[in-house]
Amino acid sequence: MGQIEWAMWANEQALASGLILITGGIVATAGQFTQWYFGAYSIAAGVFICLLEYPRGKRKKGSTMERCGQKYMTKVVKLFGPFSRNYYVRAILHLGLSVPAGFLLATILGTACLAISSGIYLLAATRGEQWTPIESKPKERPQVGATIKQPPSNPPPRPPAEARKKLSEEEEVATGVSSGPQENPIPVTDEVV
Amino acid sequence: MGNWVVNHWLSVLVLATWLGLNVFLFVHAFLLYEKADKYYYTREILGSALAWARASARCLNFNSMLILLPMCRNLLSFLRGTCSFCRCSLKKQLDHNLTFHKLVAYMICLHTAIHIIAHLFNFERYSSSRQATNGSLASVLSSLSQEEEGVSWLNPIKSPNMTVTYVTFTSIPGLTGVIITIALVLMVTSATEFIRRNYFEVFWYTHHVFIIYFIGLGIHGIGGIVRGQTEESIKENHPHRCAESFETWNDHNSHCKPPRFEGHPAESWKWILAPVVLYIFERILRFYRSQQQVVITKVVMHPSKVLELQMNKRGFSMEVGQYIFVNCPSISYLEWHPFTLTSGPEEDFFSIHIRAVGDWTENLLRTFEQQHSPVPRIQVDGPFGTASEDVFHYEVAMLVGAGIGVTPFASILKSIWYKFQHADHSLKTQTIYFYWICREIGAFAWFNDLLASLEQEMEDLGKVGFLNYRLFLTGWDSNIAGHAALNFDKATDILTGLKHKTFFGRPMWDNEFCTIATTHPKSVVGVFLCGPQALAKSLRKCCHQYSSLDPRKVQFFFNKENF
């Protein structure tokens, strides 16, 4: 059991609680139940919780599957810095958010589930877990220069590499750095047909 | 398309039957509560929400009954064994038990949502009709009190001051409803794929909350909150006659007496009793089987952190392609992990090859490496899974194993070899083409040795053409390729030591199928795959393409095995 990251389960539970809060809130508001304004609150709280919990944090070990399209919310959640990183904050936040929804029967299930999620986050926080955003690695651009090997310096027809090397050594020995017009090692004749 | 139908008709039939039954039960209950006279007065207060709640309740009962059954793996094995005369497709259906379990779970979640929303409306309407002072039929019905015999009330909210929340948490149905819904939510959130794959223990232990779910479901109906008019009351006060004249019910000379109501007895327990008993029996059986002694006859540490365990257990008999669950109490009391059997059924032991990929497997390898005596105790449950006997029925067999999918083929190849040696008549196979595709060979060095020894034995028997295998290394780099090119002339492959050379990259299936079709122009070729879905698609396509239109000529049959 040593490798369990409780925060991951708390995250799933909180996301589910957010959805339950939204559903209960819609039922209470649309049905105009008594004290339906708690339902309206519940919808707002549920949406906030879903947005906060949607980006999954990075696992300590191994690769993490991102949720579809979570990188936009990751940027926003990252902005809050320690408030979103620290799980104590999340635990207290969820507990606080769950209380008003407890006054209405339609949303009380959301309260219970969110409170459980808050408890699991508390457990995760006591074990020192933290929310780290999943960053996409910058794509390594291939060095354009390195993939192209040195182009040939002689025009065709070219003798094989060894002959070229030998010739250039002889030339260097004889004339120093060769410059000036190119000396064709093999005589080129124009064939007029 | 035809091949899909042949392979999947039973799944489609099962799903269609299940959905059909759900729809039927829902509609039947809905119409009963929406139309019956017995509930006329109840509907007066509650409207259609009554019917929605009861219909979804019936579907919940039905699905709660079904959800435990796919998890009784010993029962399923028993069914598979007794159905030996049945066609293979029936047995293969039993391998999809987990998928069915998940589908039923989704249906339970859907109906739970419907049920809760309907009941929220029900409670709200009961509450507002209790508080109504306009003398409507609803408020008259609500004020029918329970002084006389205690059974004539309709509205469970006894006084205008009671809140719905109070009634929920002080009544058995309400309280159990909340508890079992929380249990359901916990089960679902810990069973998502992400949690299951990465933190299996969270899933496994939390999922046992289903015990609370079933107990709560059994007692959920006690309390008789759903009320309908009694038989005698309908004679005195038929809704069609008397509903309009509700103001005069209490008059002495009225033809209509005030109606009386009775609650339903709990009925969920009738649905779930049998599966719960079966499941309890299954757990007892698992425990009993796990207590049987397993003798480890040989422990082999292969390179790349692979452990082979050869074991014996009394009364254990296996078939090719099956798997077992293994538990090691010294590492974890409650964890059971599945492993494919790699030995052939003809051998006098059974073996598994365990690769260190996670906590439990790494602990296991470490425990065996330390070579403490006595050897740590192992418990085994199984074998499970459909036997892949089809392999033996084809004249020419094309076996494709990708990556870890090569493991069941160890068992198959060994079994084929034994049958061949002993001239077993059930073996129709004359030639085998085995394709092994993996990224790097390290973790499967043990399989390599198996192929080498098979190769050797075949040479000794002079039967060189029986097993043809090709190894494809997809994770190669220019170093490996260069090295192979330099050693081109050697008789054995430098990577594997086998007679057949290693190929680099993925197989070109068109070439392979073409070659086999021309070599065996009149045979029926069975193609078996244990690997990824993408590969299954391309193999299936090739099977269609290269099967001749003439049924007497070469035919390729793709078998989607799930090991």
Image (tube, grey):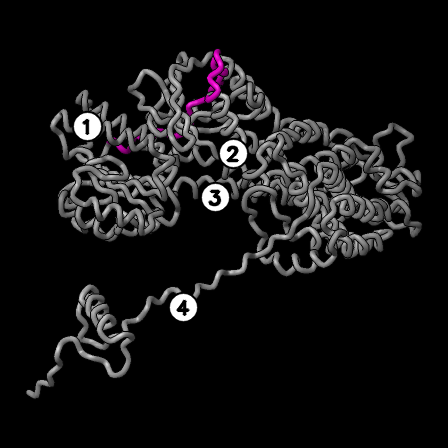
The kind of residue tagged 4 is Gly
Of the numbered discs in the image, which one, if any, rests on residue B358?
Answer: 2
- Does B517 sit above or below residue B176? below
As measured in the structure, the alpha-carbon distance from the residue carrying label 4 to the one carrying label 2 is 42 Å
Name the residue: 19% across, 25% down. B457
Host chain of mark 3: B
Are callouts 3 and 2 both on one chain? yes
Near-viewer residue (B251 or A175): A175
Q: Position of residue A134 (x, y in %)?
A: 61, 52
The residue beneath circle 3 is B16
Near-viewer residue (B402 or B148): B402
Crowding at mark 4 (Cα within 10 Å: few <14, some 14-19, many 20+): few
- Give the residue furthest to the left: A193
Q: Position of residue B326 (x, y in %)?
A: 48, 23
As measured in the structure, the alpha-carbon distance from the residue carrying label 3 to the one carrying label 2 is 39 Å
The residue beneath circle 4 is A145
The residue beneath circle 1 is B456
Label 3 or label 2, whichever lies nearer to me, is 2
Label 4 or label 2, whichever lies nearer to me, is 4
As measured in the structure, the alpha-carbon distance from the residue carrying label 3 to the one carrying label 1 is 52 Å
Near-viewer residue (B143 or A159): A159
